[in-house]
Image (spheres, rainbow, N blue to C red):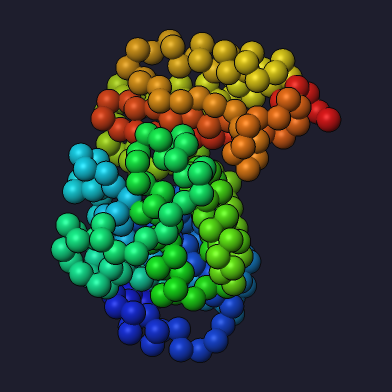
């Protein structure tokens, strides 16, 4: 199917002039099959008569100094092809000036921003100060510009999904947030735009990350500490994996329950590439 490319809010508004059930899939481009699955999930939900907007915007405010903003892959032409094949209607690819009102990146920190809840300063928020402030701010802006009924986000960035869901609830956005299960490669590694940074040897090391998560799941009946020990035993096999955290939390990312449904989350650096993953699990056996 054909896809409309919109680069400004006026072009986007013109493309959305008719009132239809609308879903948005927010991306930073460099699309892969994980993003395509978000679009396909959105299409299943809105049906053939609904509209799907994919935002394609590398957001500068969620990158700290020294992170990979400048080298983050920008592949708009290929992204449009992915969107067309997956069933999107519109690709919204705005400039920084279109989103923030200025192209001067040095001034963005003086603008009004959305402060996350305390969860935004843990885990990824502790490792990347200011990251979730940038994420929530741009998500709110893009929600305002696209005016969707539904917004689809991948579970791979589970903390981000949790915080966006909380923001939408607390600020009373009239939007339903839909989480979509992580898409994985054949060896279990979660699909990510950053996987392309990995060398062949680093890619082999990275495959231990989902293995560690599966080990945690397998030991979940023994309790939190035993489960984490099982995961750490896998990661420690490869000294090139620089582990940031491996934790078990409740589904809302509060402290882990003694028994019941939980989430295990991991962040690690392999070479210069930071990788995230998580899985649903049961602690202490079933209830």
Query: Could you tell me residue 168's position as x and y percent?
Result: 56, 62
Q: Examine the rendered structure and indicate whether residue 253 appears above or below residue 82.
A: above
| Quarter of the rendering containing residue 64 | top left
Q: Is residue 29 left or right of residue 146?
A: left
Q: Residue at x 40, y 25 (%)?
A: 244
Q: Nearer the viewer, residue 80 or 242?
A: 242
Q: Is residue 47 left or right of residue 100?
A: right
Position of the N terminus by quadrant: bottom left
Query: Could you tell me residue 230's position as x and y percent?
Result: 58, 14
Q: Examine the rendered structure and indicate whether residue 142 appears above or below residue 279.
A: below
Q: Nearer the viewer, residue 120 or 89?
A: 120
Q: Is residue 22 something that shows in the picture? A: yes
Q: Examine the rendered structure and indicate whether residue 54 appears above or below residue 131.
A: below
Q: Residue at x 51, y 44 (%)?
A: 118
Q: Residue at x 81, y 28 (%)?
A: 286
Q: Is residue 276 something that shows in the picture? A: no
Give the tally of numbered discs: 0
Q: Examine the rendered structure and indicate whether residue 130 appears above or below residue 151.
A: above
């Amino acid at each position: 199917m054909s896809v409309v490319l919109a680069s400004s809010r006026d072009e986007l508004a013109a493309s959305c002039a008719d009132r239809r059930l609308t879903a948005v899939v927010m991306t930073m481009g460099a699309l892969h099959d994980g993003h395509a699955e978000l679009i396909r999930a959105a299409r299943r939900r809105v049906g053939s008569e609904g509209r799907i907007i994919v935002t394609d915007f590398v957001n500068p405010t969620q990158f700290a100094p020294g992170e990979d903003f400048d080298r983050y892959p920008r592949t708009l032409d290929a992204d449009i092809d992915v969107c067309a094949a997956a069933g999107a209607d519109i690709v919204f690819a705005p400039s920084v000036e279109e989103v923030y009102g200025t192209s001067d990146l040095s001034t963005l920190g003086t603008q009004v921003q959305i402060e996350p809840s305390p969860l935004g300063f843990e885990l990824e928020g502790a490792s990347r100060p200011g990251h979730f402030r940038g994420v929530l701010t741009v998500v709110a802006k893009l929600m305002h510009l696209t005016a969707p009924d539904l917004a689809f986000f991948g579970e791979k960035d589970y903390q981000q999904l949790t915080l966006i869901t909380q923001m939408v609830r607390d600020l009373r956005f009239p939007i339903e947030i839909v989480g979509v299960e992580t898409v994985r490669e054949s060896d279990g590694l979660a699909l990510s735009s950053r996987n392309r940074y990995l060398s062949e040897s680093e890619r082999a090391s990275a495959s231990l990350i989902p293995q560690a998560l599966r080990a945690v799941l397998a030991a979940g009946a023994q309790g939190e500490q035993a489960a984490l020990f099982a995961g750490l035993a896998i990661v420690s096999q490869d000294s090139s994996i620089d582990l940031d955290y491996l934790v078990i939390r409740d589904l809302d990312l509060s402290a882990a329950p003694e028994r019941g449904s939980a989430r295990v989350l991991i962040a690690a650096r392999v070479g210069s590439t930071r990788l995230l993953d998580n899985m649903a699990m049961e602690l202490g056996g079933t209830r």
